[in-house]
Image (cartoon, grey):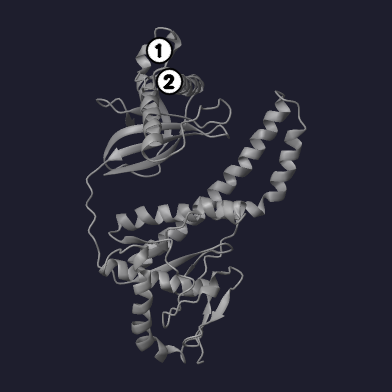
């Protein structure tokens, strides 16, 4: 099993120059090979297979950087090219010098990458100072060097180790429903109360961007303001990740199984015109964090199909109310049993119950949800109506 560790590194002046050359060579070889593939396909209708070594004769400055970094660029291009034909992904794009991510990946061969005395050994670069805040378990496979827009350097170390995770008995379940304002609402009625970090810095970002747009291109003042804008965005990112890590850790420690909907956040941000709010919430990121944090503890993240009508079903009797499709309805009363529901809490409860069903019966596809509704009507009516008087969310009809 593979696992990644990310540490900050502090290269000296010569190493920073080498990293800059490597970033440029990796971008160049990627764009050059992509252009040759496109030209060959247009002329012959066949795919061209080349290697970085074939370009070193014409471009001798490619020999100055790590050859494994160029080889990994070839693999990344080949993977993107194959995904376009196999998975209906977007066609590979050329990497921009100013807008693309500055990074490269190199592999560990016969101990060429190792950590000794607070320094990491990298091919061509030698020993680089590293801040190692946790121990690395496993054998190092590869390292990705990255430079952020704020001129900070990080090393992502990929290691391979033997998985010894013991599965636990799934007893405590919780359902999570996406909320635009609070990030998510649980089946126990708890709200995440997301601080909305991007909204806090909107005015400051607008002011800095206006100043940046009025400066002369290529001037030192423009670079200074660009650095300030990047610092603000970096602070927003760090605050968001810190919050999401703490929330996902809390859920993974407290519960044995977390049930969550398989939502398409990109489509939601485009169709409902909530792009900035959906991106700021990062609901997909907390789902990713929950997946590996639960796995490392022997627990499970249960994905409920996006077509499951979690908001329309009554969590007490299973009645399906199609009128709740209107997003403006935040609370409603069940016409069948008279139970009053909060929209988000009711959806989270239904997601939790569907997650329990998946663990016992298994996934049956979206066509089986009609049978699920009839099953809910028969089972929940028997055990749910007795709780109407005691629950603070419901009342007798």
Image location of residue 369, percent across then percent down: 37, 69
Seen in the picture, residue 97 relative to 4 is either above or below; the reply is: above
Which of disc 1 and disc 2 is earlier in sequence?
2
Q: Residues within 10 Å of mark 1 (few under 14, many from 20)?
A: some
| Residue 21, position as x, y percentages in the image | 48, 19
Q: Give the camera-side residue of 122 and 270.
A: 270
Tell me if mark 2 has few (under 14), some (14-19) or many (20+) residues whose alpha carbon lies within 10 angstroms of its own. Answer: many
Asked if residue 49 is positioned above or below residue 326 in the image, the reply reads: above
Residue 117 visible: no
- In the rendered structure, the answer to whether residue 210 lies left or right of residue 329 reads right
Q: Quadrant of residue 84?
A: top left
Total numbered labels = 2
Residue at 22% over, 58% down: 166
Decide which of 194, 185 is in the foreground and name it. 185
Q: Which residue is mark 2?
A: 33
Above/below status of 180 relative to 85? below
In the image, which disc is placed on residue 241?
Answer: none
Residue 228 visible in rendering: yes
Does the CB distance between marks 2 and 1 fall below 8 Å? yes
Quadrant the N terminus occupies:
top left
Q: Quadrant of residue 34?
A: top left
Residue drawn at point x = 67 percent, y = 29 percent: 223
The picture quadrant where one finds residue 60 is top left
Point out the frontmost of discs 2 and 1. 2
Residue toward you, 147 or 88? 88
Q: Where residue 76 sits: x, y (%)?
A: 39, 30
Please report the residue visible at 35 percent of the width from the left and 87 percent of the height from the top: 383
Q: CA distance from mark 2 to mark 1?
A: 9 Å
Dot 1: element: helix
Looking at the rendered structure, the secondary structure element under dot 2 is helix
Q: Is residue 392 above or below residue 171?
A: below
Residue matched to label 1: 55
């Amino acid at each position: 099993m593979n696992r990644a560790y990310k540490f900050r590194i502090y290269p000296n002046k010569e190493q920073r120059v080498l990293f800059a050359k490597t970033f440029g060579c990796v971008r160049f070889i990627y764009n050059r090979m992509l252009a040759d593939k496109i030209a060959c396909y247009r002329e012959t209708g066949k795919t061209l297979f080349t290697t970085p070594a074939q370009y070193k004769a014409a471009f001798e400055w490619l020999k100055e950087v790590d050859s494994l970094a160029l080889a990994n660029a070839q693999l990344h291009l080949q993977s993107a090219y194959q995904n376009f034909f196999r998975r209906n992904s977007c066609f590979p794009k050329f990497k921009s010098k100013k807008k693309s991510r500055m990074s490269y990946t190199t592999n560990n061969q016969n101990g060429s990458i190792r950590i000794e005395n607070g320094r990491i050994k990298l091919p061509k670069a030698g020993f680089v100072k590293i801040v190692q805040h946790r121990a690395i378990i496993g054998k190092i496979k590869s390292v990705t060097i990255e430079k952020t827009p704020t001129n900070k350097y990080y090393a992502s170390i990929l290691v391979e180790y033997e998985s010894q995770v013991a599965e636990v008995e799934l007893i405590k379940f919780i359902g999570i429903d996406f909320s635009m304002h609070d990030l998510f609402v649980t089946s126990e009625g708890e709200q995440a109360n997301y601080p909305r970090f991007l909204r806090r810095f909107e005015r400051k970002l607008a002011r800095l961007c206006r100043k940046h747009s009025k400066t002369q291109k290529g001037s030192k003042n423009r670079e200074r303001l660009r650095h300030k804008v990047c610092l603000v965005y970096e602070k927003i990112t760090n605050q968001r990740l810190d919050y999401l890590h703490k929330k996902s850790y809390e859920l993974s420690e407290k519960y044995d199984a977390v049930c969550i909907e398989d939502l398409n956040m990109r489509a939601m941000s485009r169709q409902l015109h909530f792009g900035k709010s959906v991106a700021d919430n990062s609901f997909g990121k907390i789902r990713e964090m929950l997946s590996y944090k639960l796995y490392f503890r022997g627990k499970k993240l249960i994905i409920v199909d996006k077509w499951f009508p979690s908001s329309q079903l009554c969590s007490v009797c299973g009645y399906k109310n199609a009128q709740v499709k209107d997003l403006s309805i935040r609370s409603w009363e069940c016409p069948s049993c008279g139970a009053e529901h909060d929209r988000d809490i009711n959806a989270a409860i239904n997601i939790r119950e569907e997650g329990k069903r998946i663990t016992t019966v298994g996934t049956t596809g979206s066509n089986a949800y009609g049978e699920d509704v009839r099953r809910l009507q028969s089972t929940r009516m028997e055990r749910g109506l007795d709780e109407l008087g005691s629950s603070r969310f419901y009342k007798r009809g």
